[in-house]
Amino acid sequence: AAKVGADETMMLLHWKYLDESLPRRLQGQVGFYIVQLESPSDAGRIAKALDAEFDNSSDRTLTETEKAFQTEFVRMMGNIGLLVRVIGSAVVFAILLVAGNTMAMSARERTMEIAVLKTLGFRNRLLGSLVVAEGLLLTLLGWVVGCGVAWLICRGVETAFSTYFPVF
């Protein structure tokens, strides 16, 4: 059984073979190293030692934990939280406008039915309640279907992008 939170999407290979396949100008360069530690409490000390080793080289290093690296990777994409909130708010506002317009159109299109019901003795309050209840029922049904589809999409995103978004 795999450890919870372990990255199972990584592929390790012999660097020399990959390096030979690159153009000459890119050969001999490395983007990042992964160092496995005996104890997480040693991370700070080892990070300082590794960075000190390359302080005076032309290729200085920045050593950080895997969690910090992933957080920085996600942060490079911008303020995703704000973007999602702004887009989500605009979508909710648009949905409210559409729902209100749909309810008003539904009531306007049923003038004949409402006239018949009034002739039969239905009160205005009851007729208004029926129109609002229908709108609420359709809205709730749409909400349930939409949340179900969103849940399925989120499960797919979580599975496909767990390396980039470890806590989705």
Image (cartoon, rainbow, N blue to C red):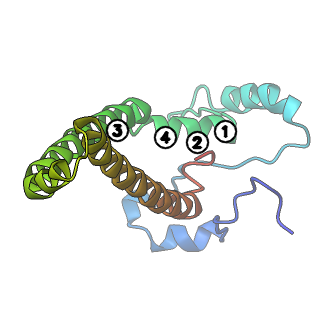
Q: Amino acid at mark 4?
A: Val
Distance Cα–Cα, label 3 vs label 1: 27 Å
Task: Read off the residue under disc 3.
Answer: 88
Q: Nearer the viewer, residue 109 or 89?
A: 109
Residue 108: percent from the left, percent from the top?
Answer: 9, 49
Mark 1 element type: helix
Mark 2 element type: helix
Task: Read off the residue under disc 4.
Answer: 74
Q: Amino acid at mark 3?
A: Gly
Query: Pointer 1: residues within 10 angstroms few (<14), some, or many (20+)?
Result: few
Task: Read off the residue under disc 1.
Answer: 67
Distance Cα–Cα, label 1 vs label 2: 5 Å
Q: Residue at x 45, y 62 (%)?
A: 149
- Can the viewer see residue 59 in this picture? no
Tag 1–tag 2 contact (CB < 8 Å):
yes
Residue 128 versus residue 15 in the image, above or below: above
